[in-house]
Amino acid sequence: MNKETHLFTDAEIFGFIKQRRLVKRRPVPHHQFLIELTPGDYVVHVEHGIAKFAGVIKMGNENSQREYLMLKYAANDSLYVPTDQIDRVNRYIGGGDQPPTLSRLGTQEWIRAKQRVKESVEEVAQELLALYAAREVVPGFAFARDTVWQQELEVSFPYVETPDQMEAQAEVKADMEKARPMDRLVCGDVGYGKTEVAIRAAFKAVMDGKQVAVLVPTTVLAQQHFATFKQRLEAFPVRIEVLSRFKTTKEQQAIVEGLASGSVDICIGTHRLIQKDIVFKNLGLLIIDEEQRFGVAHKEHLKKLRQEVDVLTLSATPIPRTLHMSLVGVRDMSTMETPPDQRLPIKTYVARYDERLIREAILRELEHNGQVFFVHNRVQSIAYVAGKLQALIPEARISIAHGQMPEGELERVMTEFAGGKSDILVCSTIIESGLDMPNVNTLIINRADRFGLTQLYQLRGRVGRGANLAHAYFLYDKGKMLTPTAEKRLKTIFEATELGAGFSIALKDLEIRGAGTLLGQRQSGHISAVGFSLYTRLLAEAVEAQRARLAGIPEKARPSPLPPPTIDLPLKAFIPEDYVADVDTRLSLYQKLAKVDKLEQIEALAQEFGDRFGALPAEVKNLLYAVRIKVLAARAGIESVSTEDGQIVLRLFEGMQFDRGKLEPILGEGITASKAQIRVGYERVAGWEKALEGVVRGVG
């Protein structure tokens, strides 16, 4: 443990809980981190361990059929998992890039592996809670409720807010109004409105007499944010400055003095903003855009600030540690998944370098009066590449931008390109973060195999920010063999074209690179043993158990969630291939059905099925009925609904009994009950489906 964790005893941490200052975080819904399964993938079954996913198979008899996931274990053992239990299976993400060892069915090795990890995560949970207790012990500033000017600013927003954007904003404001420092991650895809959430939070802080620091990774993004903040807040008496290398030494000094005197309200800056000579008179809010772009030393400095001021972090692809801490419910997180109105997915192409393809792509964009980003991330050869492009497309106006250019020249080039004075910007990754140029709708990346996955995703997010269809081309050298890792990255970016793919990208990046060190190298082996998803789930449970222990709740009194009921009905209940042909789509629908826990969700899914695929066949209606029974059975504490000798048998969890008196009104022909089970003779009872639903409702 580090020195910081020794500052707090159990009694002190319990004190924070009692005062409701160490609040229970709302865990991020698990469904936001699901990744599609493909045959050949390594997967983890919660009860049975690590296997290889071999595909989907339909099994059953004339009256009862379902689809199953086929999992292959060590020693050629197979396990068939009903699709209603698909939530118990997750793609395996390890601590490194080595393939895992398959588990053996019918042995104790998986149980022992899970037990070792459980013991490990208990220690980690203690560290996490102590780490975050350090922030809770410092009293924060409770911001006042919204002013009239705040309402005027929000009404002046020229676009329609998405529901997610509104919810994220409400969560940020609620945090700011509490008397403890905020530490919230707002995670939303590129162009989903995170900047507007930041602007409103910054204005709220200024209205209460506090200063705001906005920390960004690049000078170009600092200028962009400066322009956006100025434009949104121009009607109000707020002094906004930008601190970057675009400013002269004299201008920088004036801004530094303004921060110290309190005359600067909002300062947007790069790493320059966290240097030793920067002193704020009354800093109240720190906004960090794309935290993953900052180094270890900067993060240590930010960690200290987190204990004193409200911190709002914005990210499209959260770094593994941030994602991990949000998943276990230790850090607050808001997610923005709803795309803005009129936003279209970006058409993505992965291809070998081809001059004909490049010319065709650029000319098509120029015909629509649009502009093009051509990314070449080698400063030494960027002018040569621009010359080749000029020879290829002599009618185009080409400019060059990269981070090693003199400040004044770079600012001029970017301003002129934004103003439409050139058609193609040949540039380095300087455009990667946050740039908003709606007229740029074609992106071409040269040598895309040399980029990281999150970097490719961020770059692609620079186009398609308006209502027009955008195109992204990821090119690699003609004569070059791709490495397996580069091939995986390009395959992922090609497949992740749907709006809001940032979460999938973050997890896929984890899968390619390995989950690595989250709280030190020692955890890497435990993550490899059970996979990242199960490790995270076990850690979340350990964190909750630690909270309960510190709050003095006896172990017997702690609520223990019951596992989902097992449902096996005499019905053909599956999604037919002639209704939904694509196996990935079918699996994603089964995943949605497995997560249903409210009856109204079933109606919404039935509507979605009808809208997407047409009238529901009998098999899908049966499947939705089975999900309905599962939801009702979960409420009633029923462990299983299965068939035996022409009867449907309902069994409660061990130690529970049916209330005979409560059941009397629903007992009738073909329905019998004892303390341990209820039997419905489906072969003899007409309309047994309705009778069964009545029984399950009656028990509940």
Image (spheres, grey):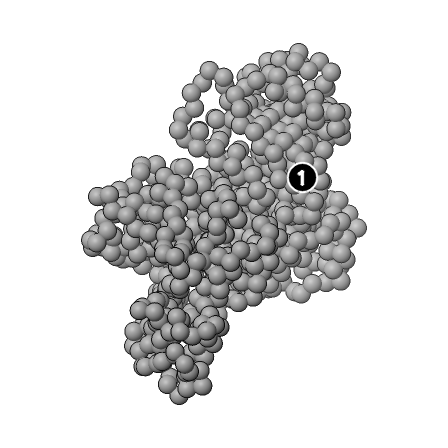
Would you say 180 lies left or right of 570 here? right
- Local secondary structure at mark 1: loop
Q: On the rendered structure, is 536 left or right of 409?
A: left
When asked about the image quadrant of residue 546, the answer is bottom left
Mark 1, other Cα within 10 Å: few <14 / some 14–19 / many ≥20: many
Quadrant that contains the C terminus? bottom left
Could you say where residue 307 lies in the image, as x and y percent from the top left? 49, 55
Q: Residue at x 31, y 59 (%)?
A: 122
Instruction: Name the residue at the left extreme.
Output: 107
- The amino acid type found where label 1 is placed reads Arg
- Asked whether 489 or 688 is in front, the reply is 688
The residue carrying mark 1 is 465
Residue 396 placement: quadrant: top right
For the residue pair 699 and 423, the one nearer the viewer reads as 699
The reply to whether residue 376 is in sight is yes
Q: What is the count of numbered marks?
A: 1
Q: Is residue 288 left or right of residue 102?
A: right
Residue 311 place in picture, x, y as percent = 55, 53
Q: Is residue 400 visible?
A: no
Query: Among all residues in the image, which is located at the extreme top?
Result: 391
Instruction: Spot the residue most to the right.
Output: 235
On screen, 649 above or below 515? Answer: below
632 lies above or below 204: below
User: Vertical placement of 108 versus 691: above or below?
Assistant: above
Left or right, 327 with reference to 401: left
At x 70%, y 45%, the residue is: 342
Using the image as rendered, state which of residue 459 and residue 50 is in the foreground. Answer: 50
The image shows residue 99 at horizontal and vertical percentages of 31, 38
Q: Position of residue 285 (x, y in %)?
A: 60, 53
Residue at point 48%, 61% (across, down):
622
- Judging depth in this view, the residue of 272 and 579 nearest the camera is 579
Q: Is residue 189 above or below residue 638?
A: above
